[in-house]
């Protein structure tokens, strides 16, 4: 009777197959499963010395030597994204040298130790290229951006409930990047015909996730290399750009006064009181944003500071909650000049119009005209 051939189980499969708990054929530079599903494989860019040659010369091949066979390729597309991050993307995210230095030097260094952050960085850079790069390559950039973002999310998920002094900086950067990515990926530029309130609520919940990470790790972040990112929005704003913002503040203030008069003082958990507090938070942030240059960092806090019951009202298509959302859209349109927010102001106003109807009232008509007029 022939002897039964032994089988040794391999533990060297790619990260994607391990995550999906399927057998990996370990084919390089991309395993067959990843190639079939058109996703990025962790083998890509790795150099594995040939094992068939047992000569002394083969045994001293360095792992970091330049590959000279067709089975190993440099990840040129990822290198393009990393280069674009340093020369272009960083400058579009912040507007002062101290925070530029953090994003250009400290964050990539952290990303070398935290793969989920590197994938998130590459995803955001790729998405920026898909907005501003050559037309014939934009589809390729978008696909790569989505792949990197998906890998980043899968790698980061187990860590979100375990924020430590060792990973808090990488998690903070990741949380900021994934919010920007979601705005750019789910907004009107990605799907111009959509009026999806669900996309808005999804991004708003991500913003609340960023706030949660900061709340858990603020002492560590303030003592580390990313502390300058917590101080975004302190440079003064040009006075010429504040005229429409002050008009918006007056309109929202009038709305707040009306809500305060109409809410019942004996019913502290009423719908009107929830909306009134949400409008007050918007007024507080708008007051800060009027006087600073990096307004996006201020205005992006609103979804994180409103009561979660307000988001529930949005989900239920509550009329006044949608009206407040439209005015928040005007604030983004007038004050937040960032490529990843491009079109979101009009997007939010149009969602309110879609659910309420174009003739809902003078407040919505004003918001629609303010968007049409522009900053």
Image (spheres, rainbow, N blue to C red):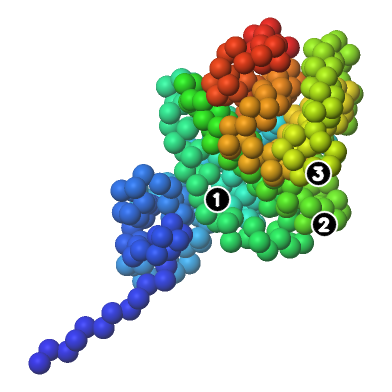
Residue shown at 51% from the left, 38% from the top: 145
Circle number at residue 220: 2
Q: Residue at x 58, y 57 (%)?
A: 157
Residue at coordinates 43% horizontally, 47% vertically from top-left?
40
The image position of residue 368, as x and y in percent, is 65, 12
Q: Whole-percent x and y of residue 26?
A: 35, 61
Q: Quadrant of residue 372?
A: top right
The residue nearer to you, when weighing 229 against 60, is 229
Question: Which residue position holds label 1?
Answer: 153
* 336 up-or-down from 232: above or below: above
Return the residue nearer the eye: 244 or 218: 244
Q: Secondary structure at mark 2?
A: helix
Residue designated by label 3: 268
Spatial CA distance of label 2 from label 3 is: 36 Å
Relative image position of residue 190 (x, y in whole percent): 50, 27
- Going from N to C along the chain, the mark reached first, 1 or 2, is 1
């Amino acid at each position: 009777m022939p002897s039964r051939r032994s089988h040794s189980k391999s533990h060297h499969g790619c990260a994607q197959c391990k995550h999906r708990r399927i057998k990996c054929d370990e084919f390089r530079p991309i395993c067959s499963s990843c190639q079939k599903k058109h996703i990025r494989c962790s083998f890509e860019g790795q150099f594995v010395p040939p094992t068939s040659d047992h000569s002394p010369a083969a045994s001293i091949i360095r792992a970091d030597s330049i590959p000279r066979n067709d089975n190993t390729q440099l990840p040129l597309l990822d290198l393009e994204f990393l280069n674009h991050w340093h020369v272009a993307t960083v400058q579009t995210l912040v507007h002062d040298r101290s925070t530029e230095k953090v994003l250009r030097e400290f964050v990539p260094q952290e990303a070398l130790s935290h793969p989920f952050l590197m994938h998130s960085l590459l995803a955001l850079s790729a998405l920026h290229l898909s907005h501003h790069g050559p037309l014939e390559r934009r589809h390729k950039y978008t696909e790569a951006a989505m792949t990197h973002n998906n890998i980043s999310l899968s790698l980061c998920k187990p860590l979100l409930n375990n924020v430590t002094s060792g990973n808090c900086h990488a998690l903070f950067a990741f949380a900021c990047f994934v919010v920007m990515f979601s705005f750019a990926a789910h907004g009107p530029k990605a799907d111009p015909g959509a009026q999806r309130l669900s996309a808005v609520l999804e991004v708003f919940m991500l913003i609340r996730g960023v706030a949660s990470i900061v709340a858990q790790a603020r002492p560590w972040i303030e003592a580390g290399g990313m502390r300058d990112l917590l101080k975004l929005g302190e440079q003064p704003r040009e006075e010429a750009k504040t005229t429409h913002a002050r008009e918006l503040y007056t309109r929202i203030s009038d709305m707040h006064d009306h809500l305060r008069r109409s809410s019942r003082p004996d019913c502290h958990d009423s719908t009107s009181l929830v909306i009134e507090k949400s409008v007050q938070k918007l007024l507080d942030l708008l007051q800060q944003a009027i006087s600073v240059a990096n307004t996006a960092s201020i205005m992006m806090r609103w979804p994180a500071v409103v009561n979660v019951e307000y988001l529930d009202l949005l989900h239920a298509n509550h009329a006044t909650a949608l009206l407040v959302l439209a005015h928040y859209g005007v604030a983004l349109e007038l004050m937040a000049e960032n490529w990843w927010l491009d079109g979101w102001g009009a997007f939010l106003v149009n969602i309110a119009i879609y659910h309420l109807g174009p003739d809902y009232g003078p407040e919505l008509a004003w918001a629609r005209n303010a968007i049409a007029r522009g900053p």
